[in-house]
Image (spheres, rainbow, N blue to C red):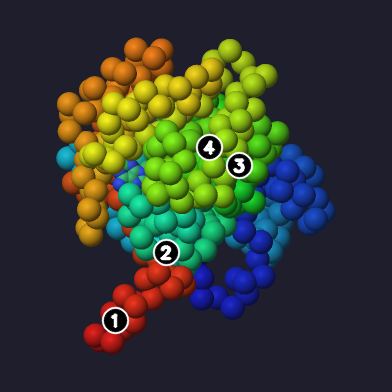
Amino acid sequence: MNDLSAPQVEKKTDLLGMDRDAMQAFFASIGEKPFRAGQVMKWIHQFGVSEFDEMTNLSKALRDKLKKVAQVRTPRIVAEQHSDDGTIKWLLEMDNKNSVETVFIPEKNRGTLCISSQVGCALDCSFCSTGKQGFNRNLENWEIIAQMWVANKALGCKPKEERRISNVVFMGMGEPLLNVTHTFPAARILMDDFAYGLSKRRVTISTAGVVPAIDKIKAEVDVSLAISLHAPNNPLRDELVPINQKYPLEVLMPSLHRFVEGGHSKKHVTVEYVMIDKVNDRPEHAHELVDLLQGLACKVNLIPFNPFPNTDYRRSSNNAIHRFRAILEEGGLNVTVRKTRGDDIDAACGQLAGKVADRTKRTLHRVEFAQGEQ
Ligand code: SAH
């Protein structure tokens, strides 16, 4: 495959992460026609080809030219784990210090791929294990779309066959809206007919609430939106989702209304609400949530909390979840309860860890400790 140690590699242009406009600009820059962009995107994304010599409808001369100036760089699969329920988790090495996790969740009528947008996460939500590791860096376009590329290949997906990956959610490690420069082009590739051709209903960006970037979605990528709400009032949300201190509910909620406004009749926001025992699962929280979501086209997804080492939080009881759900439904909301998948391989929501070369102070002492032990 790619020899990353070859000295000239640094100068080559990476093609995997280029959306259609970028690919056309690239071909123009090497004096080639724009239609080459679609041809090469098909080879890369639909046929899973990373070697130019396998792109047989390109002339030998063009293939040789491409070999000199470009590459299709792909990550190394470090580990692949299978859950009893069919969920698959891949650990992908992006550089020699960092790896991220990607999860495939098969269901009866669809297959969802959960992809990461950053190495670690800077938001430090109190109930999420990814945040506990600190933040290292944003993933590049190619590193984000590579997760789809690898999963398709690993699952043996062929073009024109029924899609095993029918939906993609940016719900892995990281905050996608703090990395829009790279997540937006990756989302465009997911929806491009020359690549994966997913409809915008089937590509979902999940955010803890980065308001200025929520306002950019409609114009720049027009994907579906999920908001990790988790609390119906500011004091509790400040504690669970600290970015709320920057964009509190009175700023966040109008941005969600703006997102659905003017859209088609089915356009809505998915509201995610992790159910934590005795923290945010009381009846009064449910009533507050009904009031908060009044008039917003939304669907509420209740997520039973998934535990991880060194957390004091516990999952809400089934009774508490049913009671909460009933109050929301009485208030006229559309509610689903997420089935926990892949928790036997730590692939459930909030359990993704990867390998983060941490640069933040938060876990510095742990790193030093580990080094001292050697
Ligand atoms: N930063 C983005 C995307 C990553 S989190 C966001 O906040 O939306 C993806 C989803 O998993 C979010 O709804 C998140 O709140 C939820 N989640 C995180 N930790 C969890 C845990 N321990 N148990 C259950 N869900 C969790």
Q: Position of residue 174 (x, y in %)?
A: 46, 52
Does the residue at mark 1 contact the one at mark 4 (Cβ under 8 Å)? no
Which numbered circle lies on residue 249?
4
Q: Earlier in the sequence, mark 4 or mark 2?
A: 2
Q: Amino acid at mark 3?
A: Val
Q: Tell me where residue 316 sits by quadrant.
A: top left
Closer to the eye: label 1 or 3: 3
Q: Mark 2 packing: few (<14 Cα in 10 Å), some, or many (20+)?
A: many
Residue 261 drawn above or below residue 183: above
Res 266 seen here: yes
**Residue that label 2 marks:** 134
Q: Earlier in the sequence, mark 2 or mark 1?
A: 2
**Residue type, mark 4 in image:** Leu
On residue 211, the disc is 3
Q: In 3D space, how far apart are the residues under numbered discs 1 and 4 (Cα atoms)?
A: 39 Å
Q: Is mark 2 within 8 Å of ligand 1?
A: no
- Circle 3 residues within 10 Å: few <14, some 14–19, many ≥20: some
Q: How many numbered marks have been drawn onto this rendered protein structure?
A: 4
Q: Residue drawn at (54%, 17%), measured in percent from left and top? A: 295
C-alpha gap between disc 3 and disc 2 = 22 Å
Q: What crowding class fits label 1: few (fewer than 14 Cα within 10 Å), some (14-19), or many (20 or more)?
A: few
Left/right placement of residue 104 relative to residue 189 reads: left
**Residue placed most toward the observer, 140 or 285:** 285
> Looking at the picture, how far across and down is residue 42, in whole percent?
59, 40
Q: Which mark lies nearer to you, 3 or 4?
A: 4
Mark 4, Cα crowd under 10 Å, few <14 / some 14-19 / many 20+, is many
Reading the image, the residue beneath label 1 is 369
